[in-house]
Structure formats: structure tokens, C-alpha cells
Amino acid sequence: MNKRIDKFLKKVAWKTRRWNFEISPLHITYQYSSFEFDLFFVRIGTNFYRLFAIHFRLPNHGYTNVFTVDLWDFLFLRTYLISKQDELEDRSLYSLTPLNFWQRIQLNILNKIL
């Protein structure tokens, strides 16, 4: 019986050896005047997905002089917006035709909010 269980567990370990994920319903962190609040945090490989997140720093008259929002995410939008920003930046850098008016506006807005 132990050999069967060991064989089954070895199979499971072999099939899941490349899985790298984390799921957290609530993640709250405070360090060095920086607050991080994540609601339903999912990490798959190196990609992060959050239902709601806000990371901010409070002014401390040292290296942070004003209230600063470092990261925000709402309804998993940040991942899509970053990929859209990357696509527009690549198109502006490597394309032979310049960005049209609407694409330039999109890129400027994404650069401001991300």
C-alpha cells in the first residue's frame, strides 16, 4: 500500500514541478512608510493579478515629501493596460508610420496613470 501511495505522490510531484502560483484573499503590508493593500491577489509565474489593490507612501519629510500612489489595480485592469501601453510604445518606436491622433492620446493617458 505504501508503494502505491509513494508512486502516486511521485507522479503528482512530477506533474506539478513547474507550477508556480500564489492565491491570497487579502494581503496587507506596511514597511518603510509604504502601505500595500491587495484584495484577492493572484500570482501566476511572474504575472500579478489583483481584484482591487492600492499601494501608497505617506509623506515622511525624508525621501517622500508628498502622498504618492505607487500602484493601483481595479478589476484586473492593470495587466491589460500595461500590455496596451507596451504595444503602443513598441509601435511608436519601431513602426515606420507614426501613431495617429487617437493612439497618441491613449499612450499619453496610459503614461500618466501607470
Image (cartoon, rainbow, N blue to C red):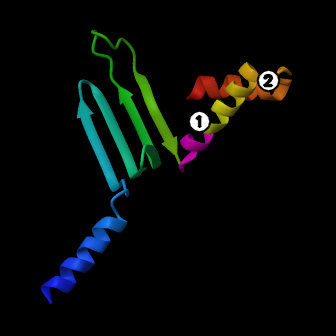
35 magenta-colored: no
Q: Residue at x 42, y 38 (%)?
A: 54
Above or below residue 18? Residue 81 is: above
Q: Residue at x 36, y 11 (%)?
A: 65
Q: Which span of residues is magenta-colored? A: 75-82
Callout 1: 10 Å neighbours few (<14), some, many (20+)? some
Quadrant housing residue 25: bottom left
Q: Real-space Cα distance between discs 1 and 2?
A: 19 Å
Above or below residue 97? Residue 76 is: below
Could you say where residue 70 lies in the image, as x and y percent from the top left? Answer: 43, 27
Q: Which mark is residue 95?
A: 2
Residue 1 located left or right of residue 85: left
Residue 96 located left or right of residue 44: right
According to the picture, the residue beneath numbered tag 1 turns out to be 82
Callout 2: 10 Å neighbours few (<14), some, many (20+)? few
Amino acid identity at mark 1? Ile
